[in-house]
Image (cartoon, rainbow, N blue to C red):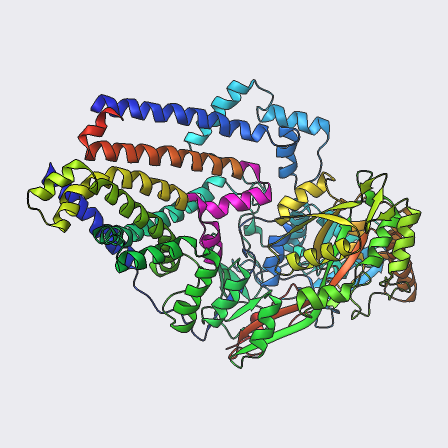
């Protein structure tokens, strides 16, 4: 199994290598001459002349062959040097560290909360398919999935901040600040996950081993919890991994409404700013996070399910 | 293995559950009487020295300028107590006694000279704004400034927020900016990225001691959330509210709403270069005659603003009134467009079968900007001109504008902020100006603006600027849209807040709660 894991890790490394090349190219694809754009950003937007550009390019090694520049850039990235933002002139790594921390916090909390809600709800639905409880839970899940975040966020802020005064309307720094965005995101994720749990449990229940388990005299809930549920965990892990990635980089509306400085907002701001070094950093983070989340999910599944070890 | 797995699962489950719920609801940070919390639209103070940020240093009074403007925008003593024009090109500034910086250093002519030199070196448009040839320290508290040409506008220009006086310790040994250390009533004590900036009272301040001890500027980019934070009692003061919130809050006795016309103009800057159909002055004038500014103010801003038919706000008496303001005139617009070779078919203006389409750029971080831009575009569409509206952030838009890849960029500036016409006319519309990205060039205008800044305020100066403004109307490099009405709101407990007409000065030192 160890060798499988190593090969899976190597696979991820190769992917990251490809990502790094794509990320490096991103800066060279921006409109205009690369050296000129970089210099212009340093000169506060005034257009440099050709001689200035040449001196700047030579001083900063921008006239060297591309592979050499790539290696130099990659070495910088490993030392945390992602360049300076065109807009703030500050090192991008500072922003990146702040944003990754905030996005991770939100992703862990909301996914955690979503699982706490979704798993029991999904199991309950699978226990009584087609019954009233299933239908109610189904309706709630659909509402949770489809409720527009911008509206729901403001509604929650009105209730918990304005009327009840329990929680802050936005910002970050204390745990209280994380509650509202967590609830908003967890609601939509929980809908997706509970539907998934219900669906895969029902599918599992139609398999022969369940009939065997039942005929051995096990009760319905014991059959579901002890026999069927463990079999849907690999699928659930994959699903949860996908949602985790989505929360990590895709919660722009929630992040803006609650003034939460996450990766999603950083990416959108950088795009609208046309701040190429920052866009590059976002690209790297998002791509690497997807690779790492997938790797983590695969490893977890193979630890959990011996049969899956061959697949890894 | 099974046991272990189950335990692990349980632990993981319990951790997640507690993590999600451990966040016990705290009290929604009610603020004490000595602290003012302000909700801001933009992040107040990244530690970089750029025009917008260094304006914040003055707006929040971390720094003082040599000359300040009173509530009528008249120059009054700041760090300089008096100034005289010794000759057409030489000004002498007498500095205030017993002023110390936040780091304990004394303010003297050397320190002021050093600071102005750093500002000119670090901020690109400062050199042209100040027009300084050399500075000479005549006595410990006397600074003589020689300008490159006769320059009457200098005292007003020295009230510009970017010219705030920095202590030497604001810069590192290489002369790079590190942190703002000034002489103002507030010193910077804390900055948390993407969250807040805190200033606290400086007890060595030369003027009246502020009533408050601390001011926290909290960054709340979403315009709805910012007002919500005020209503929830998390902040005491917010500005740049949505027009709908202004109306709502003004009906609520728990809040005070402040509103007053200030410096500030929303306008569409035309690309007069060859790439754009707006290189034709007739098209530029036609657009000016097509767009009903009253509708923009009433329809998009619920009345929070003044319709703009000329460049300077009408309330400023130091700026000449133009004799030829724009007015809504659809017939004039139609004849101008026809003259320019366009014809109207199926209600659309076309030339050689191509519809007249304008690429309009703007940015959404300023509260009223999207509404004004959309309203202008809608009015153009209604009158047969197609539009392609693209919203960016300020920097993103500027990047395209500098490349000339636009027809209209809708911007907001505070051209009246120094109480002198020179500031904006010279820095944005002069053909040699660093900030003129409009490819607009008018030699007569250039000459008038170059002359205006040399003349002492008076009839002659008013005539020169009057002519310059008339050219601006006639050659129409812009479409003025809305004169700013600054709006802010606070809790009812807040006392003595006044809106400063420069729109760049909170003046919280008089405020208490």
Q: Position of residue B269 (x, y in %)?
A: 76, 51
Q: Is residue A245 above or below residue B112?
A: above
Q: Position of residue A90 (x, y in %)?
A: 52, 43
Of B66 and B327, which appears nearest the observer?
A: B327
Residue B108 in sight: yes
Q: Is residue A261 magenta?
A: yes
Q: Is residue B294 above or below residue A222?
A: below
In the rendered structure, the answer to whether residue B214 lies left or right of residue A61 reads: left
Q: Residue furthest bottom?
A: B253
In the rendered structure, the answer to whether residue B29 lies left or right of residue B75 reads: left
User: Which of the image's four quarters has the N terminus of chain B?
Assistant: top left
In the image, which residues are magenta? Answer: A249-277
Residue B416 in sight: no
In the rendered structure, the answer to whether residue B61 lies left or right of residue B261 reads: left
Q: Is residue B350 magenta?
A: no
Secondary structure mostly seen in magenta is helix
């Amino acid at each position: 199994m160890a060798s499988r894991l190593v090969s899976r890790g190597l696979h991820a490394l190769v992917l990251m290598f490809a990502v790094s090349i794509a990320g490096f190219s991103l800066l060279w694809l921006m409109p205009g001459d690369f050296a000129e754009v970089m210099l212009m950003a340093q000169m506060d937007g005034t257009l440099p002349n050709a001689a200035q550009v040449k001196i700047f390019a030579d001083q900063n090694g921008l006239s060297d062959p591309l592979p050499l520049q790539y290696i130099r850039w990659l070495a910088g990235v490993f030392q945390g040097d992602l360049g300076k933002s065109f807009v703030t002139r500050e090192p991008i790594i500072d922003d990146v560290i702040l944003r990754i921390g905030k996005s991770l916090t939100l992703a862990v909390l909301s996914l955690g909360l979503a699982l706490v809600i979704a798993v029991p709800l999904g199991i309950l639905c699978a226990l009584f398919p087609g019954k009233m409880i299933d239908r109610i839970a189904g309706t709630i899940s659909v509402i949770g999935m489809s409720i527009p975040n911008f509206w729901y966020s403001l509604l929650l802020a009105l209730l918990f901040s304005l009327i009840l005064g329990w929680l802050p309307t936005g910002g970050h720094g204390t745990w209280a600040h994380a509650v509202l965005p967590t609830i908003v995101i967890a609601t939509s994720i929980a809908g997706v996950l509970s539907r998934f749990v219900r669906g895969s449990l029902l599918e599992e229940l139609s398999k022969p081993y369940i009939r065997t388990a039942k005929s051995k005299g096990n009760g319905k809930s014991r059959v579901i919890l002890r026999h069927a549920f463990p079999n849907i965990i690999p699928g659930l892990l994959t699903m949860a991994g996908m949602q985790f990635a989505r929360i990590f980089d895709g919660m722009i509306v929630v992040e803006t409404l609650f003034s939460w400085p996450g990766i999603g907002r950083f990416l959108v701001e950088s795009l609208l700013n046309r701040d190429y070094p920052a866009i590059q950093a976002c690209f790297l983070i998002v791509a690497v996070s997807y690779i790492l989340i997938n790797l983590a999910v695969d490893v977890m599944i193979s630890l959990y399910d011996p049969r899956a070890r061959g697949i890894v | 293995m099974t046991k272990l797995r189950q335990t692990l699962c349980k632990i993981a489950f319990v951790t997640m559950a507690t993590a999600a719920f451990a966040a016990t609801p705290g009290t929604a940070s009610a603020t004490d009487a000595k602290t003012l919390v302000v909700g801001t639209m933009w992040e107040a103070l990244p530690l970089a020295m750029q025009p917008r940020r260094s304006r914040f240093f003055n707006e929040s009074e971390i720094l003082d300028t040599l000359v300040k403007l009173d509530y009528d925008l008249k120059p009054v003593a700041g760090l300089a107590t008096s100034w005289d024009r010794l000759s057409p090109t030489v000004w002498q500034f007498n500095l205030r006694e017993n002023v110390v910086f936040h780091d304990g250093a004394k303010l003297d002519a050397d320190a002021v000279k050093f600071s102005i030199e750093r500002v000119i070196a670090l901020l690109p448009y400062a050199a042209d704004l100040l027009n300084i040839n050399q500075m000479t320290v005549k006595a410990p508290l006397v600074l003589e400034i020689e300008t490159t040409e006769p320059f009457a506008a200098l005292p007003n220009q020295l009230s510009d927020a970017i010219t705030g006086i920095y202590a030497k310790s604001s810069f590192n040994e290489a002369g790079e900016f590190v942190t703002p250390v000034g002489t103002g009533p507030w010193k910077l004590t804390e900055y948390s990225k993407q969250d807040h900036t805190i200033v606290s009272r400086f007890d060595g301040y030369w003027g009246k001691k502020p009533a408050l001890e601390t001011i926290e500027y909290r960054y709340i980019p979403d315009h709805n959330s910012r007002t919500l934070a005020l209503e929830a009692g998390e902040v005491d003061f917010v500005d740049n509210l949505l027009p709908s919130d202004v109306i709502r809050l003004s009906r609520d006795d728990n809040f005070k709403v402040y509103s007053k016309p200030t410096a500030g103009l929303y306008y569409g800057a035309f690309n007069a270069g060859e790439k754009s159909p707006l290189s034709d002055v007739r098209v530029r004038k036609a657009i000016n005659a097509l767009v009903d500014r009253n509708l923009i103010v009433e329809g998009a801003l619920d009345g929070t603003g003044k319709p703009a038919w000329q460049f300077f706000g009408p309330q400023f008496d130091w700026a000449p009134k133009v004799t030829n303001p724009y007015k809504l005139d659809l017939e004039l617009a139609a004849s101008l467009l026809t003259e320019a070779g366009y014809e109207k078919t199926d209600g659309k203006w076309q030339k050689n079968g191509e519809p007249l389409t304008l690429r309009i750029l703007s940015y959404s971080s300023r509260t009223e900007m999207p509404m004004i831009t959309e309203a202008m575009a809608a009015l153009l569409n209604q009158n047969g001109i197609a539009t392609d509206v693209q919203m960016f952030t300020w920097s993103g838009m500027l990047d395209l504008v500098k490349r000339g890849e636009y027809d209209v960029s809708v911007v907001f500036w505070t051209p009246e902020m120094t109480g002198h016409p020179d500031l904006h006319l010279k820095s944005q519309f002069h053909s040699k100006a660093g900030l003129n990205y409009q490819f607009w060039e008018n030699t007569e205008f250039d000459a008038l603006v170059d002359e205006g800044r040399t003349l002492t305020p008076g009839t002659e100066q008013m005539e020169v600027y009057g002519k310059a403004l008339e050219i601006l109307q006639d050659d129409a490099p812009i479409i003025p849209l809305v004169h700013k009405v600054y709006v802010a709101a606070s809790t009812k407990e807040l006392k003595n807040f006044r809106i400063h007409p420069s729109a760049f000065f909170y003046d919280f030192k008089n405020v208490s709660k």
